[in-house]
Amino acid sequence: MSVSKKIVLLGHFGVGKSSLLRRFVEDTFSENYIVTIGVHIMKKEVSIAGEQVTLIIWDVEGTDDFTKYRPSYLMGAASFIYVFDASREVTYSDLKYNLEHLSEKYPHVPVHIIGNKVDLVDANILQENLLSQNIKPDYLSSAKTGENVEQLFENVAAQVLKND
């Protein structure tokens, strides 16, 4: 038996949400930047401990003000994936504020924090930035190289199954 779960990708413009989604669903990467307008939805079925889970992943347009997301994009989500660009500190400087907003409006929806584009930043500088901002990401990933992309989505799928 298969279950379907809505997963929503959130974050600033240009942090790599669409690239993470394409890497996971299609195992592709493109250097061409295409702005997501509104929402782009893709799905992929994964097997977790013998159970089939269809992840319906909503790639929502980037914004730096999470209060402006359309509630219809976020309603019914089993999990949020908050993506920041590890090479652009401005994309995670307001992370705490955005996470507080999400937990206030959607208290029962787990949030996974992902630092993407780790291939573009020195590991020591990244660690310094994360420590100075007191950020503990669940994963550091690269849509370009595929680093931690599959693990991220499989972990999300396992968690939403467990929370059922």
Image (cartoon, rainbow, N blue to C red):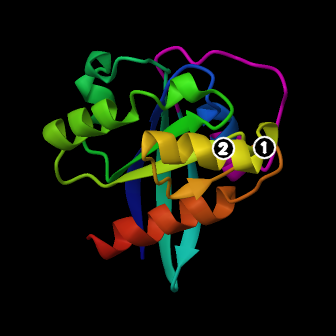
Which residue is pictured at 68% across the width and 60% down the height? Answer: 148
Image x and y of residue 90, in percent:
53, 22
Q: Quadrant of residue 115?
A: top right
* 2 and 1 marks in contact (CB < 8 Å): yes
Find the magenta span and give its range: 21-40
Residue denoted by label 2: 126
Which residue is pictured at 52% across the width and 85% down the height? Answer: 50
Q: Secondary structure at mark 1?
A: loop
The rendered magenta stretch, by its main secondary structure, is classed as: loop
Q: Quadrant of residue 72?
A: top left
**Quadrant (top left/top right/bottom left/bottom right) for the N terminus:** bottom left
Is residue 151 rendered to the left or right of residue 82? right
Image x and y of residue 92, in percent:
49, 32
Q: State the residue in front, 5 or 82.
A: 82
**Looking at the image, which residue sits at the far bottom?**
50
Q: Quadrant of residue 5?
A: bottom left
Residue denoted by label 1: 122
**Quadrant (top left/top right/bottom left/bottom right) for the C terminus:** bottom left
State yes or no: residue 26 in magenta.
yes
Crowd tier of the residue under label 1, counting other residues whose Cα lies within 10 Å: few below 14, some 14–19, many 20 or above = few
Which residue is pictured at 16% across the width and 36% down the height? Answer: 105
Image x and y of residue 55, in percent:
49, 55
